[in-house]
């Protein structure tokens, strides 16, 4: 018995060694005796040692990864160097493994430089792994193709570029080749035909758009089991000799995702029906119905057809897939009723299916009975068109681990959750689920980690001393009713990474120990409640928390007291619309806030001066202190915020001139300094340096001087508000350089802001820019639709001169306010070209002349004020202009016509003297007289004849229509006769009585 066990172990060791040499697995030191760590008699070959040192000299090793490589006595044996393995029998180097872990955050330790040709000395090398180092865009050396004993090559993510050398075709013993995640290309794959031993091939991200022979090349590898060609720009070019291809009978895993393949690829897949185990075809251009042929892939365990354009439902043949465990069909156009869809999965697959992903389709109907899937663990039905209530059968599924039914129209109350013993994730957000949840609903869910009930009509009524049986990682209960008391059960959750209880009806004070936040915290949202009290320091226990990107949103509550100190790893801090008070100098107490990207403290009671310490927040994108009581000057250190995109200091008490350092913030998109006491001239550098600006508001300050001509360099400007200052001089004539107001760009139909969406770690907190505008006679704030607004407000200044004709080129402008200035001249004649204009205010200037007739073509105009100028003549006739109140025109003594009570000359006479008709009226009369001509009567007769002949000709030729028509006439005649007879009878009775 003992001898048998020893023999089996020895045999197992031999098998492991052989597999590791011919497959993609990487041996670990000490797993078997390839190295010489314990054999002092075996030393490396001197020639190979020198070659390795030359290889090291060609590299840049800033992190000392190769510090064990050296010529010192204790480091002389290269077989003991890091990443080097030698043969115990010959001493030759047979393995070089210098891979580093793939990057997770920012920079990481890696080798750089070039690969030295000295590696050619390692002619016994079988294993080469340089993955995830950085070779700076250099080409893969061709000489690697002359290391003919190589069996394993891994260069994934190593920073190579250029064309893959065809010399790899010389590596006839190669078992595994991984060149993925580089910037490589291949024109043809003929060299693959020589790699008859190849079992694993990964060319993901290699550009194969010119390699039209990829099907033949990969099909003829007899031992190939794993083929990875994701993101290769593949096109499905089906060769005419497809039936003659000697397809590999061993291919088990095939990944062709993220390419441009069409449904023609399905015919090629049929060649592998006896071997395929995993098929990944997501993010291609697959269209039409899912083919029946997949039902013939007898050994298939994983199928991913997500993110395509597939339609209809699922073939019945899928029910025969007795090995299928995972089926991904999300993000398609599947339209079948869900009960019928699942009915087609009847058969052996019911006992094997574990994961079913049908998210983001157009599946409809109610939730069916899914208890037949006895091993189902994960079910994703979110973002469909399901309706109805939960069936009772949902309370009988004990194997479910993930259940996602978000974004449907599911109604009713939740089923009994206590039997979901294995449930780990529950996603039910954005439905119409109602009712009250109590402790009993969750009493047996000890494995629950992810709970999302957001945006339903649920009430969570738990006792204050309830201790849940679970420790949640994600808690999303937005818009559920948790209050009015703060839910104490949350204090028992110590390891959550996300917590969202916004809009939960809480009007209590947060317990102090709640602020001892989870060490895993990445996202905290308590916004839109009525929470009171102090916010204690937002510190974390985790010593490594600075590797995270944390977002905190406490906005729209009643928090008070000073601004809390927060952890340096907080990237996004939203405290707006509270009653925080005191100084903001605490922001300078942060030892390191380089991770911070957004600080939003608008609408609070903050006072004092802004600290001059912004140079330590080098990555800040958003800085918003609007609507507070801040005073003093704008600190010059804000100029160190080179990444800053939004600076909003509106409605405070800042004084002085704009700091010149602000011109260094070249990425500014939104600058709002309105409603302060700033003074001085508008700097010329705003136009010359801040050329990315889209929103500029300096309204209600004390700026003077003229508008600098450089402001015309802001060709991306959408909102320019310089109103209520002391600005004088002329309006620059170059305003037609505002190209964003001349024509609409491709992304303008979408809401432009938040413009830094995607910077967040989770993308959960979306900062929305806002701007206050004098719009249609009242001050309004624009936020969600800000990206669609385009306007210029120069009102309440001392501007003089003419209104530039160039305004007429701003076809996308929505509002123009030039009121309360000293402008002279006429209204520009081409004003009708401003086709999107909704509000025009020229009130109280010194304009003269007639109102241009083109103003009648402004179909969207809803606000017009031309009052108190020196305009004269008739108000142009149009339904729109006459619909405005007379107040829009008063104060122009020589203006006449509706809606003013003053009539124009000739308005009192009924008859029109032909001599008084102008040329345009004469032409119109002539056109009306000439309209009825002999040709008119001829066309009318022809039309009548064709219509009459078409109707009655059809009745004569088509018997069924003729019978129906005659029957209709008979029915009408009968109805008329009966009605007349009844009425006559009634009349006689009345006369007789």
Image (cartoon, rainbow, N blue to C red):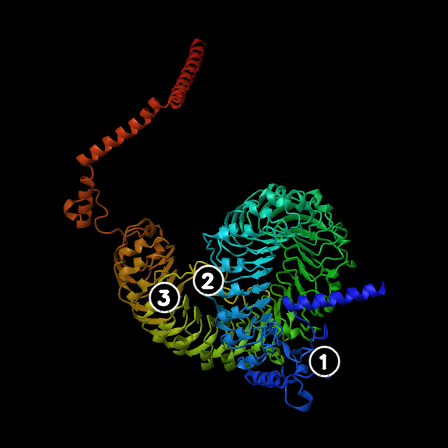
Give above or below for 47 relative to 134.
Answer: below
The percent position of residue 700, horizontal first and vertical second, equals 44, 71
48 vs 67, nearest the viewer: 48
Where on the picture, by quarter, is residue 573? bottom right
In what quadrant of the picture does the C terminus appear? top left
Give above or below for 902 relative to 701.
Answer: above
The percent position of residue 597, horizontal first and vertical second, equals 56, 72
**Which one is closest to the eye, mark 3 or mark 1?**
1
N-terminal of the two: label 1 or label 2? 1
Give above or below for 70 relative to 846.
Answer: below
Q: Which residue is rendered at x = 14% and y = 47% of the image?
A: 915
Where on the picture, by quarter, is residue 320? top right
The residue at which mark 2 appears reads as: 211
Residue 234 visible here: yes
144 vs 677, nearest the viewer: 144
The percent position of residue 948, horizontal first and vertical second, equals 29, 27
Callout 2 environment at 10 Å: few (<14), some (14 to 19), or many (20+)?
some
Mark 1–mark 2 distance (CA, rounded to whole Å): 45 Å
Q: Secondary structure at mark 3?
A: helix
Where on the picture, by quarter, is residue 594? bottom right
The residue at which mark 1 appears reads as: 37
The residue at which mark 3 appears reads as: 739
Callout 3 environment at 10 Å: few (<14), some (14 to 19), or many (20+)?
many
Q: Secondary structure at mark 1?
A: loop
Mark 3–mark 2 distance (CA, rounded to whole Å): 43 Å
In what quadrant of the picture does the N terminus appear? bottom right
Mark 3–mark 1 distance (CA, rounded to whole Å): 70 Å
Query: Position of 732 compared to 102: left or right?
Result: left
């Amino acid at each position: 018995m003992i001898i048998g066990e020893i023999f089996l172990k020895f045999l197992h060791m031999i098998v492991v060694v052989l597999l590791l040499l011919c497959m993609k697995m990487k041996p670990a030191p000490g797993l078997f005796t390839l190295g010489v760590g314990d054999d002092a008699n075996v030393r490396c070959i001197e020639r190979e040692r020198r070659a390795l040192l030359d290889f090291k000299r060609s590299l840049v090793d800033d992190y000392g990864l190769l510090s064990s490589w050296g010529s010192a006595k204790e480091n002389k044996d290269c077989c003991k160097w890091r990443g080097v393995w030698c043969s115990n029998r010959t001493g030759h180097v047979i393995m070089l493994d210098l891979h580093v872990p793939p990057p997770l955050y920012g920079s990481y330790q890696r080798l750089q430089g070039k690969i030295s040709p000295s590696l050619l000395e390692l002619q016994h090398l079988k294993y080469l792994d340089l993955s995830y180092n950085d070779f700076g865009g250099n080409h893969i050396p061709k000489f690697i193709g002359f290391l003919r004993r190589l069996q394993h090559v891994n260069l994934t993510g190593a920073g190579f570029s250029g064309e893959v050398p065809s010399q790899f075709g010389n590596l006839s013993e190669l078992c595994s080749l991984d060149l993925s995640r580089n910037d490589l290309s291949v024109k043809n794959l003929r060299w693959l035909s020589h790699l008859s031993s190849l079992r694993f091939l990964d060319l993901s991200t290699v550009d194969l758009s010119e390699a039209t022979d990829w099907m033949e090349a990969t099909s003829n590898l007899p031992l190939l089991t794993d083929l990875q060609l994701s993101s290769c720009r593949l096109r499905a070019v089906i060769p005419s000799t497809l039936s003659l291809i000697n397809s590999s009978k061993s291919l088990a895993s095939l990944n062709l995702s993220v390419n441009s393949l069409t449904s023609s690829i399905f015919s090629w897949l049929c060649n592998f029906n006896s071997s395929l185990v995993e098929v990944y075809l997501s993010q291609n251009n697959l269209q039409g119905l899912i083919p029946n042929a997949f039902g013939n892939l007898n050994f298939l365990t994983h199928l991913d057809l997500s993110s395509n354009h597939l339609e209809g439902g699922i073939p019945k043949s899928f029910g025969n897939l007795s090995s299928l465990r995972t089926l991904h069909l999300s993000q398609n156009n599947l339209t079948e009723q869900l009960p019928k869809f699942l009915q087609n999965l009847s058969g052996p697959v019911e006992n094997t299916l574990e994961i079913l992903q049908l998210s983001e389709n157009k599946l409809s109907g109610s939730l069916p009975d899914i208890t037949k899937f006895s091993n189902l663990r994960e079910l994703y039905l979110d973002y469909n068109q399901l309706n109805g209530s939960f069936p009772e059968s949902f309370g009988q599924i004990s194997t479910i681990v993930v259940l996602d039914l978000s974004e449907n129209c599911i109604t009713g109350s939740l089923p009994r959750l206590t039997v979901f013993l294995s449930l780990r994730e529950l996603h039910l957000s954005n439905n119409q689920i109602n009712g009250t949840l109590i402790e009993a609903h969750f009493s047996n869910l000890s494995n629950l980690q992810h709970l999302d009930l957001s945006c339903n009509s649920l009430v969570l009524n738990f006792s204050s001393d309830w201790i849940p049986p679970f420790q949640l990682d994600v808690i999303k209960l937005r818009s559920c009713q948790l209050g009015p008391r703060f839910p104490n059960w949350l204090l028992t959750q110590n390891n959550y990474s996300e917590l969202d209880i916004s809009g939960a009806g809480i009007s209590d004070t947060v317990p102090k120990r709640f602020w001892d936040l989870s060490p895993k915290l990445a996202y905290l949202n308590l916004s839109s409640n009525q929470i009171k009290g102090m916010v204690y320091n937002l510190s974390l226990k985790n010593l490594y928390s600075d590797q995270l990107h944390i977002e905190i949103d406490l906005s729209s509550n009643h928090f008070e007291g000073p601004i809390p100190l927060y952890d340096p790893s907080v990237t996004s801090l939203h405290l707006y619309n509270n009653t925080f008070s005191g100084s903001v100098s605490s922001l300078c107490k942060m030892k390191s806030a380089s991770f911070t990207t957004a600080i939003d403290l608008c609408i609070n009671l903050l006072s004092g001066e802004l600290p001059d310490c912004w140079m330590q927040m080098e990555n800040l994108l958003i800085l918003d202190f609007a609507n507070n009581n801040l005073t003093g000057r704008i600190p010059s250190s804000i100029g160190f915020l080179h990444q800053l995109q939004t600076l909003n200091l509106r409605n405070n008490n800042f004084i002085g001139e704009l700091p010149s350092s602000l011109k260094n913030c070249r990425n500014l998109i939104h600058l709002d300094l309105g409603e302060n006491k700033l003074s001085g001239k508008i700097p010329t550098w705003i136009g010359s340096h801040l050329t990315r600006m889209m929103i500029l508001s300096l309204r209600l300050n004390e700026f003077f001087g003229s508008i600098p001509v450089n402001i015309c360099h802001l060709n991306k400007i959408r909102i320019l508000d310089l109103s209520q200052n002391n600005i004088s001089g002329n309006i620059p004539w170059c305003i037609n350089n505002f190209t964003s107001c001349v024509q609409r760009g491709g992304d303008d139909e979408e809401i432009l802001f938040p413009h830094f969406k995607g910077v967040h770690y989770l993308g959960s907190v979306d900062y929305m820019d806002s701007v206050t505008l004098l719009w249609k006679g009242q001050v309004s704030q624009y936020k969600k639709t800000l990206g669609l607004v385009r306007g210029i407000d120069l009102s309440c200044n001392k501007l003089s001169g003419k209104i530039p004709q160039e305004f007429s080129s701003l076809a996308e402008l929505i509002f123009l306010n030039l009121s309360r200035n000293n402008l002279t001249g006429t209204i520009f004649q081409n004003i009708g070209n401003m086709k999107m204009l909704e509000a025009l205010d020229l009130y109280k200037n010194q304009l003269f002349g007639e109102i241009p007739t083109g103003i009648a073509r402004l179909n969207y105009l809803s606000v017009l004020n031309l009052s108190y100028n020196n305009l004269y003549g008739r108000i142009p006739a149009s339904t729109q202009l006459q619909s405005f109140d007379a107040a829009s025109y008063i104060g122009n003594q020589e203006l006449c016509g509706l809606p003013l009570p003053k009539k124009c000359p000739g308005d009192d006479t009924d008859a029109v003297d032909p001599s008084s008709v102008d040329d345009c009226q004469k032409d119109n009369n002539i056109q009306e007289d000439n309209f009825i001509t002999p040709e008119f009567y001829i066309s009318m007769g022809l039309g009548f004849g064709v219509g009459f002949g078409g109707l009655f000709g059809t009745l004569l030729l088509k018997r069924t229509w003729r019978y129906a028509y005659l029957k209709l006439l008979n029915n009408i005649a009968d109805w008329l006769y009966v009605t007349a007879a009844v009425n006559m009878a009634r009349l006689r009775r009345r006369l007789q009585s």
